[in-house]
Image: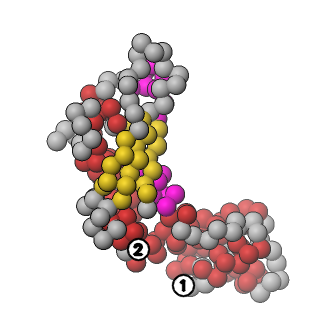
Amino acid sequence: MAGSEDLWARWGDWGKHDARGMKGGEALILELNRIVHSSGIVSPVTSRRGLAARLRYLDSPAGREALAEQGVTPRSLRSWTRGKATPSPASRERIDAAYWWRRRENLIRSGWLVRHLDNEGRGSRMEIYPVDQSHVDSKYSRPLSDRSITVRYIWPDLVQAWADRDEAMVDEIWDDVITDLDSDYAAYAYVSSVGIGA
């Protein structure tokens, strides 16, 4: 199969006429991030409940390490958990960042994300939305439609590449996904977004 660079080249300079989008691999990364966020604490960190829930979640050696990596000192953490002080807006952002990092790591480590997406071998439905051509002159636009396919088998490799922040591997996996579309698959090398029904 052609490498990513060859695949992109098949459609030429896709953005030359003001088509708007991103690499399919980037869209996959954004969608995995969305799935992780949708499975976490719903209350925002700006609320009392959301803050307390995040601090409880981070009450472990790994959680405290994640907070320290965000610049939270042990002294500040003790003050917040004992109710002697309230985190500033900037500190709440650091707490939120630490929470989502730990949430992500725990979902990867536990295997939940792969199991969720693999769905006992049945896979997950993926909606692929082509680049936005609303700003493209009609003589240069291509007839592209939304596509919907059931994707199986890629999930362990995709989650591992996402966990490792290996964008080149995510791009390769995207190539595998779109080759199942049809002869015009190269037109979906770039997309406006991807949705995973998981």
Hey, which quadrant is residue 144 in on the image?
Answer: top left
Q: Which residue is drawn at 19% across and 38% down?
A: 2
Of residue 4 and residue 34, the one placed in the foreground of this image is 34
Q: Residues within 10 Å of mark 1 (few under 14, many from 20)?
A: few
| CB contact under 8 Å: marks 1 and 2 | no
Q: What element carries label 2?
A: helix
Instruction: Work out how far the residue at label 1 is from the one at label 2, CA to CA, in angstroms.
Output: 21 Å
Query: What number is the disc on residue 112?
Result: 2
Left or right of residue 187: residue 99: right
Residue 79 visible from this viewpoint: yes
Query: Residue at (82%, 78%) from the top-left corner?
Result: 85
Q: Mark 1 points at which residue?
A: 61
- Looking at the rendered image, the quarter that the C terminus falls into is bottom left
Going 56% across and 85% down the picture, which residue do you hit?
Answer: 60
Identify which amino acid the numbered label 1 is placed on. Pro
- Asked whether 185 or 83 is in front, the reply is 185
Residues in magenta? 14-35
Of the numbered discs 1 and 2, the one sitting upstream in the chain is 1
Per the image, is 17 magenta? Answer: yes
Amino acid carrying mark 2 in the image:
Trp
* Residue 76 visible in the current orientation: no
Residue 51 vs 140, above or below: the answer is below
The image shows a total of numbered marks equal to: 2
